[in-house]
Image: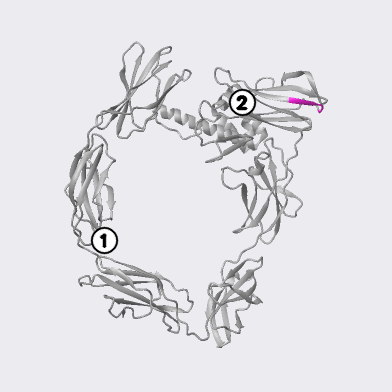
Amino acid sequence: MKLKYCILYIMLLFGSLSISISAQEKSTETPKKIVVKAFAKKGAILLRWAVTDKYAWKYSNQYGFVVERTTVLRDGKPLTNPEKSIISGDTIRPRPPKDWESFIQQNDMAAIAAQAIYGETFQVDNQEENQLLRVFYESEELDRRFGFSLFAIDQDFKVAQYAGLGYVDTDVKENEKYLYNIKSAIPKERMELEPSGVFISTKDIEELPQPSDFFGYFYKNAFVLVWEYDQLLPYYTAYNLERSEDGQVFNKINDVPITKLADTPYSGVSYTDSIPQYGKKYWYRIVGINYFSETSPPSEVAELIGFKEIKTEPIISGTNIISENEVELEWTFAEEEQWKLRKYELLRAEKAVGPYKTVIDSISPNQKKITYGPLSDINYFKLKAFGKYQDYKESPPAMVQPIDSIPPKKPQGLEGIVDTLGVVALKWVKNTELDLKGYDILRAYRKDQEFTKLNKANLINESFIDSIDMTSFDKAVYYRLIALDNRYNESVPSDTLVLKKPDRIPPTSPVFKTYEIKEGAVDFSWVNSSSDDWEATVVYRKNVTDSITQPWEKIYQTSIDSITSFTDTKTNPGRKYQYTLITVDQSGLESEPTPPVVIVMPGKLMQPGVKGLYATVDREGKFIQLTWRFKEENAVEIQVYRKRVEDSFTLYKRLAPDDKGWIDQNLTPNTTYKYAFKAVFNDGSVSEWKEIEVKY
């Protein structure tokens, strides 16, 4: 039996019951109970229930449930002696595997539920021998089985009955009202499970609401159907989507019920359907499915038509000025897209960014040129191509300027960098003028020097590479940028860009002045570098207690020249540290490190021990599980000591410092054990001694 689906995250909602597959196991103090729902039909009462705990589900599959019915009212009057009976007969449990064989061939949800209940495994094989990890993996697998099982039975009431979580009572009368109690058959010494009940009669027939907010739209060559999901969650767990070609006869198009498989910020759900035929109208509606596989009235109908959108845009290829007040515009459009066109519109604006207004409407789709007038000093045109279903594409703007005396705007965003070889990389923000011809780049080595043009032809890109002399005594280089249009109108020069030449001489080193150890911290003072271009002083530290190969760690940096001291409070007792200083100049060059200063911190004899030490005895599983909390840094191991009451402690187990639990299986029944825990740290110190007594 193979599971057909891989669902990464599922939220299962059964009334007030909400279970997350990925959630961790709840505290043992959380009450375990049964949650029940009922649905009245003519001549029958349908019952559905579930449990709130994965272990309760596991044991329920073994021991089952009992359905108890009490007749409370007859002909509207309470009975003096309510009539109580067990209507389930024997306990209700999942049907044996052979009963599922034919069912799972025709029902995907049955396959999921059967795999969860009887399948060999729900995870990839793991060869890990550690017993604690094995227990963890088994708990994770039970989470998955529990979650997938409840998901499947939520989608199909018949699957719920096969899984031992559903029952139909047909021995009912219209003049009677019943109290149904669902009780667990799990032995109390194994687990106590709170029962649950529901009060109902066959007259309490609930009308299912119509699904709401259903609509659809055409998007990227598909139909997207959207409807409200969260608000109707108390009624429906899933939906069927139906489609019609004539608006009368509807057929279901989804293979499995449509449900929400993840908890999202949106209250709706969507479904994408491919388009059977473009240009044809289709009708869609949805039908809700409740916990008992009963269906709702159909939703309102959404009518949709699929069409082929225009993929390419028209291009204005020519602007022939006939006179100062008239222009002839020409354009091109892809021949393979021509059949989709319905018309063109010509749009005009005073600025490239708009707003654009339609000046000529309903231009024939076969037309490729048009004359327009009168013109303003500056005109921007766009051509809008319309498809047959109101889709459209716009051309890029084309500027028409009968008399051009307006220069481009001042260039913006000029910036650059100089490398150590004297190569200068410049870039800037592109001007927005449609008649832009290019740029001129100018350079000078001093503020008062005349700028020299560097390029022979106009620059058409927004970047330029220059090379400067690094041997000259000039410390900076200056650049400006000018933009030109097609009529050679020049812009105002850009703001002057000043670039400093790279500094290739590192600064001098700082010097330690004093240092002192007090109250677990190290105080330093120093004398800053004498370099003129001093930018910062950086303090580095290295832990040399165990190895001299550990890397240096930057622990402090200051760019304020008046600060010449620092206190290192992040030291550990018993550790040996080296400290050094470097200077960073304004070009990012670093000085040689100062000779290291070696500091040995006083050790700490006694460290904090484990906390929250707790023992759990599982006599059926034949083990004692110990858990604790421990977050101390620099611990190298946790030592576990064990003894019987009459014996002395001996070292029994060594654990990693980040372990939070351990299972002892080497046990003798009816024996009292004492466990003791002690942590060992890398400076040789040890923690407090923690003991716990366990009766096994």
Instruction: Characterize the local packing of mark 1: few (<14), some (14-19) or many (20 or more) Cα atoms within 10 angstroms.
Output: some
Q: Is residue 473 left or right of residue 176?
A: left
Q: Toward which corner of the image does residue 646 lie, by quadrant?
A: top left
Q: Residue visible at 70% across and 60% down?
A: 280
How many discs appear?
A: 2
Q: Say which quadrant the N terminus sits in.
A: top right
> Does residue 110 show up?
no
Q: Which marked residue is nearer to the observer: mark 1 or mark 2?
A: 1
Looking at the picture, how far across and down is residue 312, in whole percent?
Answer: 56, 68
Amino acid type, residue under disc 1 in the picture: Gln
Q: Closer to the N terminus: mark 1 or mark 2? A: 2
Find the magenta span and give its range: 174-178
Q: Say which quadrant the C terminus sits in.
A: top left
| Cα distance between the residues tagged 1 and 2 | 80 Å
Q: Would you place residue 104 above or below residue 627 in this image?
A: below
Most distant residue in the bottom direction: 323
Amino acid type, residue under disc 2 in the picture: Pro
Instruction: Characterize the local packing of mark 2: few (<14), some (14-19) or many (20 or more) Cα atoms within 10 angstroms.
Output: few
Looking at the picture, how far across and down is residue 477, in whole percent?
Answer: 28, 72
Residue assigned mark 2: 96
Element marked by disc 1: loop
Disc assigned to residue 586? 1
Most distant residue in the right direction: 75
Q: Residue visible at 28% across and 31% down?
A: 681
Element marked by disc 2: loop
Q: Main secondary structure of the magenta part?
A: strand
Q: Would you place residue 317 above or below residue 662 in this image?
A: below
Q: Is residue 469 left or right of residue 273?
A: left
Looking at the picture, how far across and down is residue 420, in whole percent?
Answer: 25, 65
